């Protein structure tokens, strides 16, 4: 009898190795799948709740505060967002996004309802709640963007992040229109402001089950040792793109904070038209330009976006009636649509794939730092410009537009080596 050769035993893979292989994004199978659309719905709902609170100025004014106090409350709140983002980077890379996303959604709902107990703009409570509110937003968007970007190949990361961002545009439209319905008068009363926070909390709670369904089957990332943030920054040197992120946050945060008070000064009771056009233009531009980072590289798109935001601030100056808000809304929406995914993708590609969560929250932290600096600066410009005989809002808009222009020129000077399209090697 001829002995048969024994087949070597089949080597079984561990459950973790199978998960690791399944979690790797495959270019051929890249699709907008079920998890993407669940995350899309969740982000849409949470953005509706946030857009409702674009009338936060009514709350501060009702408590007796001014634009100066509003700027400081919003600015101090961004400290919480900034610290939250920096703390989340390594956590997301090591453990995934599930608990951060869900936990921050619960925190958001609790904070909305807690605002009902605030009775003064001068106490510690309003600042603490604003810090917690901004921390919750930071966790939700940082986790959801990392969850989505980790599912895409590098060269299409900007596209996928950008398409997720269209959920924000839709949410802003619905939220601002709902805000006009609940607080559609030049001077809101206590009952209207209370309904604003109640509605925001309920809509935030509605987003929770969609987020849970999206991350329910999330693959846990490979276990990596915690890394020093400053060590990674020294090694990869993303300082230039982070400077752009700061400027982006400064420019994009102004309408959310000060458009309401600017419109009230012009006797314009509603701001929903601005955000409706803003989001419609942004949505069309985001879909139409979704492949631009891949085709043209992020450098050109970033410069175009910064210039567009600066022009949008200048276009707010001739506004005297509600319908005139349409023009700056179009340029603002298009600029937002093209710059945000390009900045996120450029920062993400500056780091290794294993640190993509850190890269995402880092650029969002830069965006928060821009709002942290920008809101108090804008509030101070409004407060003290009259002391020098200058008109408040035109002075503030021109000052911010000048700062954005200066950052754009600095970015051009520091990035003279042409940046290749995403996924290709840079060329000298």
Image: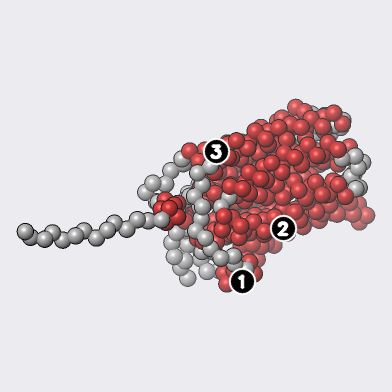
Q: Secondary structure at mark 1?
A: helix
- CA separation in Å, label 2 and label 1: 18 Å
Task: Reply above or below: 373 against 271.
Answer: below
In whole angstroms, how far apart are the C-alphas of marks 2 and 3? 28 Å
Tell which circle, 2 or 1, labels the residue nearer the N-terminal end.
2
Cα–Cα gap, marks 1 and 3: 36 Å
Q: Residue furthest front?
A: 1
Counting the numbered discs, the total is: 3
Is residue 267 visible in the rendered structure shown here? yes
Helix, strand or loop under label 2: helix
Question: Circle 2 is placed at which residue position?
Answer: 83
Where residue 114 sits in the image (x, y, percent)? 80, 39
Q: Give the labeled residue for mark 3.
A: 213
Q: Residue at x 46, y 40 (%)?
A: 33
* Tag shown at residue 231: 1
Q: Picture quarter containing residue 259?
A: top right
Q: Residue furthest left?
A: 1
Residue nearest the observer in this picture, 146 or 366 = 146
Which residue is at a point 69% across and 62% down the rendered structure image? Answer: 406
Question: Which badge, 2 or 3, comes first in the chain's sequence?
Answer: 2
Please name the residue shown 42% across and 51% down the image.
22
In-front residue for pair 289/319: 289
- At mark 3, the secondary structure is helix
With 157 as the anchor, is 413 left or right in this view?
Answer: right
Residue 390 drawn at (x, y percent): 88, 52
Asked if disc 1 and disc 3 are in contact, CB closer than 8 Å, the reply is no
Whole-percent x and y of residue 374?
A: 76, 55
For label 3, count other residues whose C-alpha is less than 10 Å away and answer few (under 14), some (14-19) or many (20+): some
């Amino acid at each position: 009898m001829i002995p048969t050769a024994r087949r070597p035993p089949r080597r079984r893979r561990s459950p973790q190795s199978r998960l690791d292989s399944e979690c790797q994004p495959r270019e051929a199978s890249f699709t907008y799948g079920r998890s993407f659309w669940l995350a899309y719905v969740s982000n849409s709902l949470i953005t509706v709740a946030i857009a409702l609170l674009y009338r936060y100025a009514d709350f501060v004014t009702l408590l007796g505060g001014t634009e100066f106090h509003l700027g400081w409350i919003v600015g101090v709140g961004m400290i919480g967002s900034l610290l939250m983002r920096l703390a989340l980077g390594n956590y997301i890379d090591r453990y995934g996004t599930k608990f951060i996303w869900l936990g921050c959604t619960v925190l958001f709902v609790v904070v909305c309802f807690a605002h009902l107990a605030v009775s003064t703009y001068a106490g510690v409570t309003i600042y603490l709640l604003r810090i917690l509110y901004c921390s919750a937003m930071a966790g939700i968007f940082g986790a959801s963007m990392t969850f989505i970007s980790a599912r895409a190949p590098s060269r299409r990361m900007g596209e996928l992040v950008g398409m997720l961002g269209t959920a924000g545009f839709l949410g802003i439209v619905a939220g601002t229109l709902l805000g006009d319905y609940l607080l559609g008068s030049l001077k809101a009363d206590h009952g209207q402001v209370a309904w604003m926070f109640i509605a925001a909390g309920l809509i935030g709670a509605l987003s929770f089950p969609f987020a849970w369904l999206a991350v329910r089957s999330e693959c846990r990332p490979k276990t990596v040792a915690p890394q020093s943030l400053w060590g990674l920054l020294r090694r990869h040197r993303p300082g230039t793109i982070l400077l752009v992120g700061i400027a982006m946050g400064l420019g994009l945060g102004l309408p959310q904070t000060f458009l309401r008070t600017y419109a009230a000064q012009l006797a314009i009771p509603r701001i929903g038209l601005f955000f409706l056009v803003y989001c419609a233009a942004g949505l069309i531009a985001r879909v139409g330009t979704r492949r631009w980072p891949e085709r043209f590289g992020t450098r050109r798109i970033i410069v175009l976006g910064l210039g567009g935001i600066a022009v949008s601030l200048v276009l707010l100056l001739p506004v005297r009636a509600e319908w005139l808000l349409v023009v700056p809304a179009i340029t603002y929406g298009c600029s937002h649509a093209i710059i945000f995914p390009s900045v996120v993708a450029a920062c993400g590609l500056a780091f290794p794939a294993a640190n993509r969560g850190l890269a995402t929250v880092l650029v969002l932290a830069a965006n928060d730092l821009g709002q942290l600096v920008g809101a108090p600066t804008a509030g101070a410009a409004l407060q003290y410009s009259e002391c020098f005989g200058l008109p408040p809002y035109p002075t503030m808009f021109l000052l911010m537009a000048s700062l954005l222009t200066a950052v754009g020129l600095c970015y051009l000077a520091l990035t003279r080596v042409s940046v290749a399209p995403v996924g290709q090697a840079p060329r000298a």
